[in-house]
Amino acid sequence: MAESGTLAIERIRAALSGRRVGRRIVYCPTTTSTNDEAWRRIDDGSADGSVVLAEHQSAGRGRMGRSWNSPRGASALLSVALLDSAGGWTGGELGVLAALAACEGIFEASGVAAQIKWPNDLRVDRRKLGGVLVESRRGEGSSYAHVIGVGVNCLQQRGHLRGDLAETATSLEIESDRPIDRTGVAIALLQALDRWLGVNPDKRRSALREAWSMRCEPMGSRVRVRHRGAVHVGTLVDIDPHSALIVELESGGRRAFEAANSTILEHDGATST
């Protein structure tokens, strides 16, 4: 059922005790979006590592202005605020990291092996399970503030997915052979995010690329990429952890497509030879 009661916030606090992610927990029964709530608190010097969780979003959003809708109490909806005084992170890199953390947390909590449709969709058998949205703002000098938002469908059943969603979306309840605990999903995801944020910067790039190659849905496949209104066709050959997709174009040459202004259209799954 989609009704699960409320998230066990004290259990989440205990599980994240002593970590960067979870230094502060904010719980909202209802909000416009968890990213909005995180930004409202970002000017507070203690905001770094703050986590916002909600049961329902009235104006949830995804990448490129898309909406994100979920029945009350059915999903893991959360955002994490990060203060980056040295400017060492890019929003694209954090998007890659967050998507990987979400996949790891989902698998730990449910046994479901989600994959990533570049740059931010979490999918199972090409059905959307969740998504990631990273928003960044520049402060003084080289400092930045980032908010990482993640939404994962947890308890939705087939009857909740109507219209186009019946063919394009799914949930952990549908995909897993285990009982789904939303609190457990949130904990596992946030712990995975904390682990990735702690990776040594000298090793982070190669670690992200290796992990992404295992999770990226169309790696080695023929892809169609929309970039600034034009569609380019080729074979996905690599990922730059700063969130550039590397494609061997059928028209010749390789090209990097940044997440900020590119998206993969549905691919045909044909592996190049």
Image: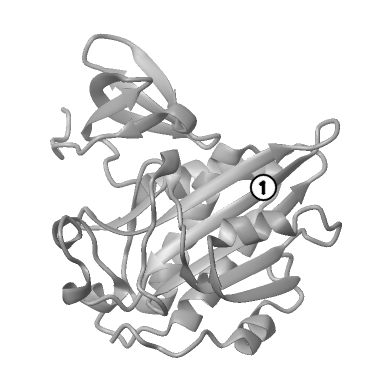
Residue in view at x 50 percent, y 35 percent: 243
**Classed neighbour count for the residue bearing mark 1: other residues with Cα under 10 Å, few (<14), some (14–19), many (≥20):** many
Residue in view at x 34 percent, y 75 percent: 111
Q: Secondary structure at mark 1?
A: strand
Q: Which of the 4 image quadrants contains residue 8? A: bottom right
Which quarter of the figure is the N terminus placed in?
bottom left
Q: Position of residue 209 (x, y in %)?
A: 48, 41
Q: Position of residue 88 (x, y in %)?
A: 73, 38
Residue in view at x 31 percent, y 70 percent: 112
Q: How is the image coloured?
A: one colour
- Position of residue 25 in the picture relative to residue 165 (left or right): right
- Position of residue 90 in the picture relative to residue 242 (left or right): right
Residue in view at x 43 percent, y 34 percent: 239
Which quarter of the figure is the C terminus placed in?
top left
- Picture layout, residue 265 above or below residue 156: above
User: Can residue 94 be seen?
Assistant: no
User: Can residue 149 be seen?
Assistant: yes
Q: Position of residue 241 (x, y in %)?
A: 52, 37
Q: Position of residue 135 (x, y in %)?
A: 59, 44
Q: How many marks?
A: 1
- Position of residue 94 in the picture relative to residue 84 (left or right): left
Identify the residue under disc 1: 146
**Disc 1 residue type?**
His
Q: Nearer the viewer, residue 188 or 273?
A: 188
